[in-house]
Image (tube, coloured by chain):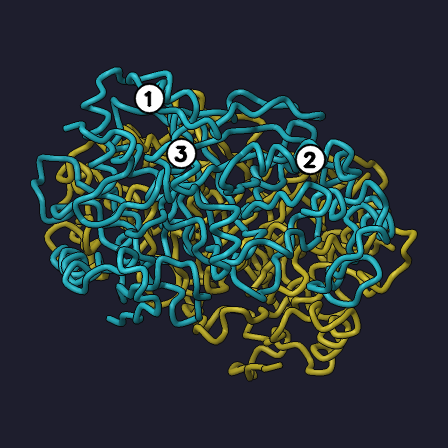
Chain colours: A yellow, B cyan
Amino acid sequence: MTESQSESPSEPESTPSRRALIGWGGAGLALGAAAAGGAVAMTRTGDDIAPTAAEAGAAVDFHGAHQAGIATPVQDRLHFAAFDVTTDDRAAFVRMLKDWTLAARRMTAGAAVGEGAYGGLAEAPPDDTGEALGLKPSRLTLTIGFGPSLFEKFDLADRRPEALVDLPQFAGDNLDRNRSGGDLCVQACADDPQVAVHAIRNLARIGFGKVVIKWSQLGFGKTSSTTPDAQTPRNLMGFKDGTRNIAGTETGRLKKFVWVDEKDGPGWMTGGSYLVARRIRMHIETWDRTSLQEQEDIFGRDKGEGAPVGKAKERDEPFLKAMLPDAHVRLAHPESNHGATILRRGYSFTDGTDGLGRLDAGLFFLAYQRDVREGFIRIQRNLALDSLNEYIQHVGSAVFAVPPGVRDQDDWWGSTLFSGEA
Amino acid sequence: MTESQSESPSEPESTPSRRALIGWGGAGLALGAAAAGGAVAMTRTGDDIAPTAAEAGAAVDFHGAHQAGIATPVQDRLHFAAFDVTTDDRAAFVRMLKDWTLAARRMTAGAAVGEGAYGGLAEAPPDDTGEALGLKPSRLTLTIGFGPSLFEKFDLADRRPEALVDLPQFAGDNLDRNRSGGDLCVQACADDPQVAVHAIRNLARIGFGKVVIKWSQLGFGKTSSTTPDAQTPRNLMGFKDGTRNIAGTETGRLKKFVWVDEKDGPGWMTGGSYLVARRIRMHIETWDRTSLQEQEDIFGRDKGEGAPVGKAKERDEPFLKAMLPDAHVRLAHPESNHGATILRRGYSFTDGTDGLGRLDAGLFFLAYQRDVREGFIRIQRNLALDSLNEYIQHVGSAVFAVPPGVRDQDDWWGSTLFSGEA
């Protein structure tokens, strides 16, 4: 077992006690060496270091002022699930949130869900479904969010944040309601897809009778980086997009654009954020028959290097007026949106083929922001003019209030919202 | 650049000339350093070495007596596509097979599809869609197969192999014809899913007007190993299955059970194999509520270690009579099937959620064999009794004749079948 040192003593809440860590590692070992998943290495909550090869299988700390999975360096794979609540028993729902927290704490550390996963009673179903046994923690993060519809339940109406608005209909939207909305969501990111899928599956299993999956999405390749100076991964159009994304190290921009501040209100959201999820289908086959010049004009970048029009390097400052008025980079740039800035964490998806032989592929867009009205909505309204719209279509949409992090071993997901509950 | 030495001088056709290798590397470099994808390292065709961490991004040789992607150590990710032919122009179809071969040769070496991918004419669509630029070869293999329906076209009826039978209806089959069949298929395996998806997409693009994708499947986690003594990966039921799979080093078993022999006929299939693909949906939620004892009884193994009933270790020889008569291991074992043995290469899939909140997840089963009648059909008939059937359902099915390998730079996919064509 290895354990990387925390480099940020100023954020003690993001660093687990070694005792707690050993506790989880030990629990894993008690289930057989395989359950510990090899190295149970802990990295920082994820807002200041890039993963190295040696850390690729490591664990990301579950605890902190903010939930992991937002400023954490983007992992390779995604399984995202939206759930609907099927119980009207508030106490039962809160118990489930606590059970989920216990499971999430163990799974992100690389352990199985339950102590008795394979040493338990033969007559009972296993505490863990088993397919992640022997796999590394793989930087798994689990991030929970609450959708607008949740606040219509459990007498929560007066606790709904003002900033959690229902998204308006945008020009070009063609939303499938079976891929939209949801009372709550869990974003599972990991470097091993089996680890991410295992996590969502086990939360669904634990939530049986209280919640049901409304829709879910696998993402196979990251399209954004929150690691400073890293190469921006390419989307399925072959372009680098989101070069100026907020890095996990940029404390100032995170504070300004991502984390909900105490004075923003409501109090239970302090340290949280708002998540917009959009399933964006790409008309791959049409795009692939478009000339290189037109593709580059549409994005406002060259395809090879990713440099803005007229510049040499991806990270050169773009000169927007050199681009066509409807170029994507120009319209999405903060300068064109009164400074609006979001943290992007999207993934490419390919879900087989539609009935016409075309790949059902595109971008599962995930963006975190301090206020949806000042972030995604402002930018997306501007993108109504985007020349890219000829090649893409938004087919799924959801918005969630993402509560602050789980502070310590006694805290649980949603405690600030459901405070006072047993 | 690194280059591993061939350890098998007896199989010169599986070792590319260094000159050819440098040719591909050079082509990549000519497109900008990114196109070469870092190290263009060549490994053996893949039938005798396990990948090491250092080789994880390496290239697998495209040439050889057999196609790569069968005995090659199993890569982490899969994109599988079945195509239907939309042209009746045999010459045009053959030209496409040659174009596919050129593209496959370049992509498996880590290069972009065309020389002019980003140095070409701005007025033309790029030769390559770009999303794999800068990614490593990632052990990409591309394996082509021809389905029974292809032989009803292009005057090929008398060339259809006897062993390429239409699969019978098996007990419990519930096949979706939109996920079944296909005139031809390409199996793309790679350690990076973006590399596998890129390859299929570019073949589909090149085939525009000649072929159209009928169905496709992403696999996110391997469930089999063809590497001797490696841990068998777990399927989504949490079990190790396929422990006694044929390893890529087992020349004797490969010759006996996988490769078509000269005396088997037809001549154009010598060195080839037959592929059965089955989409097997798992009733995950029901399985997860089944007791550990029952799960272990059904498989005939313990869940933690994977040892056969009454044994200590995964690789201990199973004592079949200690298992229930309808245990999966017992029914699938060669002893119960007159020695029938297949090479398994399946992947786990999760394609979101069905309309009832259940994960659409399971096993995309891929098996290679010398004769489908002596392999899959024999075993699957025996599995009609399998107690596992309560928890799984076969929902997609296809069978393909997989021709021998592309011998050298002048050879092309399907040359032995279409020999004499321009």
Residue B85, which numbered label?
A: 1
Q: Disc 3 designates what residue?
A: B265
Residue pictured at 59% horizontal, 63% vertical: A66
Residue pictured at 82% horizontal, 54% vertical: A126
Which percent across, then down, holds residue B312? 79, 67
The tag earlier along the polypeptide, 1 or 2, is 1
Amino acid of disc 1: Val
- The chain to which mark 1 is attached is B
Dots 1, 3 in contact, CB < 8 A: no
Q: B361 or A65: which is nearer to us? A: B361
- The chain to which mark 3 is attached is B
Calculate the distance from the C-alpha at mark 1 to the C-alpha at mark 3: 25 Å
Residue B358, which numbered label?
A: 2
Q: Secondary structure at mark 1?
A: strand
Residue A162: quadrant of the picture: top right
Residue A101, which numbered label?
A: none
Calculate the distance from the C-alpha at mark 1 to the C-alpha at mark 2: 34 Å
